Image (cartoon, helix red, strand yellow):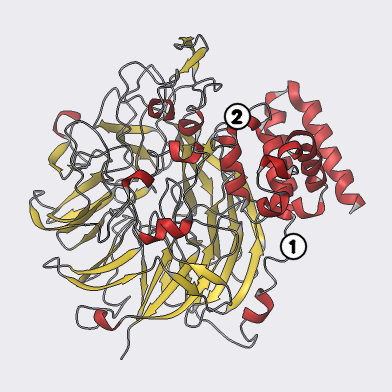
């Protein structure tokens, strides 16, 4: 213990000494941070966090008269949830004077002070003499380099004739979390799943028993990517809520390497990580879009990008920046400094084009002026250098941040509509040609020619809805044969000339013509006096609806999560917790289940399903795996992994 503390002090001193030498400082910061993260449980970080809490938070949280959550109740939350509350949630005004590092220490202290949350694991462990094999394999977000989210008949035997017999076989509840976002990976009989509390579990995918588990210092946000290196070694690659990328040995769960992918203090990784040719490609998003909603925030200095790392070591190979570095542009309406350009977050999982040696991602809006031509765009990068090869901007001049939800001074004049390309770009084979298929929060789908000129890039475009900042096309479409399946999330909003059109569309990939469509409906009577605030403003609300009331009837019912297609089926999860299997040819619903219900999980916890968002459904053999629960914008909270199996 004392040796670790001594080394910790040496690292800190080294960082301070190297502060005047940028190259040395950068190396020390990366190396020092990695060492601290690996040894966090053995360092006095919690003691420092407790001191900061005592000095800055205890006067409210330790005083019953203030009716604030106690330390004990805060300790039940995941570290990421605590950070969200301080970074841009309802605790932001009280924590604004604290640095990001101090907020992190407070969250580390609180999240680490609950000692009995995992006592159930011992009883849930598998027998130690089991073997697990390597097949089947579900290794990445897009179910392939092209992000088509297609499962072949060789990978699954759930079809139109058997899907109606799907039945819940087992479930797994996660303590301390209310959001499920990290898509699972499968290697043989092992299922890998991460949660917002920073736990990584390896489960027997047939029974749900725990094979192994480990704890990361922060919540796991991205999908679990299985990278098979050229020397045949396998690694689990994923990112946490501090924008740190990890590579773990799947057999021992030992950390092989870790690397910060932050471009600035507001960097976060919301998409997932792609692997190809011994390299990993990391999309970098940002949460300053939410922080800008605070009147005290100096807006805006962060931007998105893509980082390439060596898969065997984590060494940085190149970085593409979505905008130039922000500089002072003047003042906002409140007289505060205003910086720009900023924004163009990348939260789509990169698509790999082996034939052209390219990578494709979508970008989000600018946060502050001046607008750039890389926002709301599809971008093509060289795989080896990260050089920008071409870009297609669908919506020019889209400058927006969360201040636009509350009339704040950080909202620009004539704000845009927040029309990101968040869904992963799909590389499609269409006859002898290839197309890039891109879905935007504007509710529009674009088919782009990867080899065309800028003037002839668009082959076809199809508008399916009007979109909103929380509507249109969110996380992922699916491609099977020559049909594209597009989920629409549209929430109900009081906007001029806006009619929400949530549902699922099947499009002919050759020309964008509609093959069929399904319109999602709310199947209950909603009390509109209890509807959540719009988007990010809901995080700041001091009034929270009782979850029991939320589950009675969900305000949200659109389709936001990524969809998954097989030879005969399309699986899609709804924000009301409904999971559906559609006939791929006709759009008929062949099977559905309501997951937003109390569940006595197979691992012994009282769990609850909720909204299905972000992560797509995973199909392997005769199994369907569904993550249920997501409450970021006022949707239904939940904390369960559901494993369905067809009955023979």
Which residue is painted at 19% across and 38% down in the image?
466
Which residue is painted at 32% across and 37% down in the image?
469
Residue 110, percent across and down? Answer: 71, 49
- Which sits in the foreground, 342 or 139? 342
Residue 173, percent across and down? Answer: 53, 69
Marks 2 and 1, how far apart in space? 30 Å
Q: Determine whether 564 is above or below 493 in the image.
A: below
Residues at marks 2 and 1 touching, judged by CB atoms closer than 8 Å: no
Which quarter of the picture shows residue 561? bottom left
Q: How crowded is mark 2: few (under 14 residues within 10 Å), some or many (20 or more)?
A: some
* Count of number-bearing discs: 2
Which label sits on residue 143?
none
Q: Residues within 10 Å of mark 1 (few under 14, many from 20)?
A: few
- Which sits in the foreground, 407 or 542? 542
* Disc number lying in front (2 or 1): 2
Which comes before the other along the chain, label 2 or label 1? Answer: 2
The reply to whether residue 276 is visible in this rendering is: no
User: In the figure, is residue 207 to the left or right of 454?
Assistant: right
Q: Name the residue under label 2.
A: 93
Which quarter of the picture shows residue 213? bottom right
Element under disc 2: helix
User: In the figure, is residue 94 to the left or right of 163?
Assistant: right
Which residue is painted at 65% across and 69% down in the image?
252
Residue 619, percent across and down? Answer: 35, 72
Q: Name the residue under label 1.
A: 115
Element under disc 1: loop
Which residue is painted at 43% across and 20% down in the image?
341
Residue 362, percent across and down? Answer: 33, 40
């Amino acid at each position: 213990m004392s040796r670790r503390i001594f080394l910790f002090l040496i690292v800190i001193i080294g960082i301070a000494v190297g502060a005047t030498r940028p190259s040395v400082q950068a190396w020390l910061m990366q190396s020092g941070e990695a060492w601290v993260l690996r040894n966090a449980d053995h360092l006095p970080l919690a003691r420092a966090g407790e001191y900061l809490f005592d000095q800055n938070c205890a006067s409210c949280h330790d005083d019953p008269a203030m009716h604030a959550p106690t330390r004990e109740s805060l300790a039940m939350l995941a570290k990421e949830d605590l950070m969200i509350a301080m970074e841009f949630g309802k605790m932001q005004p009280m924590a604004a004077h604290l640095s990001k590092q101090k907020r992190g220490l407070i969250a580390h202290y609180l999240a680490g002070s609950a000692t009995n949350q995992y006592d159930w694991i011992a009883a849930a462990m598998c027998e130690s003499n089991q073997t697990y094999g390597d097949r089947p394999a579900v290794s990445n977000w897009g179910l392939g380099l092209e992000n088509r989210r297609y499962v072949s008949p060789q990978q699954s035997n759930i079809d139109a004739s058997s899907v109606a017999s799907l039945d819940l076989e087992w479930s797994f509840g996660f303590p301390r979390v209310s959001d499920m976002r990290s898509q699972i990976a499968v290697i043989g009989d092992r299922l890998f799943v991460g949660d917002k509390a920073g736990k990584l579990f390896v489960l027997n995918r047939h029974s749900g028993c725990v094979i192994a588990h480990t704890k990361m210092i922060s919540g796991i946000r991205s999908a679990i990517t299985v990278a098979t290196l050229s020397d045949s070694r396998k690694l689990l690659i994923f990112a946490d809520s501090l924008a740190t990328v990890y590579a773990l040995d799947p057999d021992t769960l030992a950390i092989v390497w870790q690397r910060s992918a932050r471009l600035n203090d507001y960097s976060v990784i919301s998409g997932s990580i792609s692997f190809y040719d011994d390299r990993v490609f990391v999309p970098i998003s940002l949460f300053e879009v939410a922080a800008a909603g605070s009147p005290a925030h100096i807006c805006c200095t962060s931007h998105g990008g893509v980082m390439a790392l060596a898969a065997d070591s984590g060494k940085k190979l190149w970085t593409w920046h979505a905008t130039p570095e922000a500089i002072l542009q003047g003042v906002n309406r409140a007289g505060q400094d205003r910086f720009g350009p900023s924004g163009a977050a990348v939260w789509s999982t990169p698509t790999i084009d082996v034939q052209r040696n390219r990578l494709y991602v979508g970008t989000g809006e600018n946060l502050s002026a001046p607008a750039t031509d890389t926002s709301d765009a599809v971008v093509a990068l060289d795989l080896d250098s990260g050089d920008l090869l071409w870009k297609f901007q669908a919506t020019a001049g889209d400058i927006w941040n969360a201040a636009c939800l509350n009339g704040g001074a950080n909202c620009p004049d004539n704000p845009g509509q927040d029309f990101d390309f968040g869904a992963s770009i799909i590389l499609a084979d269409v006859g002898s040609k290839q197309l890039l298929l891109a879905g935007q929060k504007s509710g529009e789908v674009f088919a782009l020619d990867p080899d065309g000129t800028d003037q002839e890039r668009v082959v076809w475009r199809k508008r399916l809805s009007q979109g909103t900042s929380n509507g249109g096309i969110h996380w992922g479409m699916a491609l099977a044969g020559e049909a594209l399946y597009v989920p629409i999330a549209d929430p109900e909003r009081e906007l001029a000339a806006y009619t929400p059109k949530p549902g699922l569309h099947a499009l002919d990939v050759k020309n964008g013509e509609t093959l069929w469509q399904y319109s999602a409906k709310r199947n209950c009577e909603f009390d509109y006096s209890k509807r959540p605030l719009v988007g990010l403003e809901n995080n700041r609300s001091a009034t929270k609806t009782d979850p029991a009331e939320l589950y009675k009837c969900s305000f949200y019912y659109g389709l936001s999560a990524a969809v998954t297609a097989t030879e005969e089926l399309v699986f899609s999860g709804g924000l009301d917790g409904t999971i559906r299997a559609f006939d791929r040819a006709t759009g008929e619903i062949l099977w559905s289940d309501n997951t937003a219900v109390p569940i006595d999980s197979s691992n012994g916890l009282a769990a609850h399903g909720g909204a299905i968002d972000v992560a797509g459904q995973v199909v392997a053999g005769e199994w369907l795996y569904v993550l249920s629960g997501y409450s970021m914008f006022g949707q239904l909270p939940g904390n369960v992994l559901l494993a369905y199996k067809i009955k023979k």
